[in-house]
Amino acid sequence: MGTDVGGGTSFSMLQTLNEAYKVVQLRRQKLTPFQALFLVTLGGAKALRLEDRLGNFGVGKEADFVVLDLRSTPIMAFRNSENLPDSLDELADRIFSLMIMGDDRAVHATYILGELAYGQA
């Protein structure tokens, strides 16, 4: 899973996941929230053969990542409670809400090489 405007319609991975989910549904297949999360992290790194440097929070890896706010918009705040999820199903549901309703407002902070580049710690 990747994005560039030359190959898609948005620079946003959340928007790209939204579109991918719809395409997969039209093909009568499934894209679970956990599969989607893998595809935009370690899956993408593996596709580029960069999994030794990127894709998760393993020791010694480059730490470029975003912190996402599950309650960043009024509708997402309504849908996602302030409480931590109690189960994998609840966690999957919250990731799904990011896939379907998330946009640039969901980005709370951006880190590049482990240093805060945007937002609040």
Image (cartoon, rainbow, N blue to C red):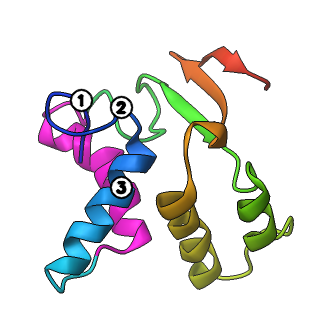
**Within the magenta stretch, is there residue 48?**
yes
Task: Identify the residue at image location x=21%, y=72%.
Answer: 24
Question: What amino acid is found at the position of numbered circle 1 in the picture?
Answer: Asp
Q: Is residue 72 left or right of residue 38?
A: right
Which residue matches tag 1? 4
Q: Is residue 28 above or below residue 16?
A: below
Q: Residues at badges 1 and 3 in contact (C-beta under 8 Å)?
A: no
Q: Is residue 19 above or below residue 103?
A: below
Question: Which badge, 3 or 2, is on the more N-terminal residue?
Answer: 2
| Predominant SS of the magenta segment | helix
Q: Position of residue 88 (x, y in %)?
A: 58, 79
Q: Residues at badges 2 and 1 in contact (C-beta under 8 Å)?
A: yes
The image quadrant where one finds the C terminus is top right
Which residue matches tag 2? 11
Task: Identify the residue at image location x=74%, y=52%.
Answer: 73
**Within the magenta stretch, is there residue 2?**
no
Question: Which badge, 2 or 1, is on the more N-terminal residue?
Answer: 1
Question: What amino acid is found at the position of numbered circle 2 in the picture?
Answer: Phe
Q: Quadrant of residue 120?
A: top right
Q: Residues within 10 Å of mark 1 (few under 14, many from 20)?
A: few
Q: Is residue 43 above or below residue 8?
A: below
Q: Quadrant of residue 67?
A: top right
Task: Identify the residue at image location x=51%, y=69%.
Answer: 96
Question: What amino acid is found at the position of numbered circle 3 in the picture?
Answer: Leu
Q: Position of residue 89 (x, y in %)?
A: 57, 84
Which residue matches tag 3? 17
Q: Nearer the viewer, residue 105 or 111?
A: 105
User: Which residue range is magenta in the image?
Assistant: 31-51
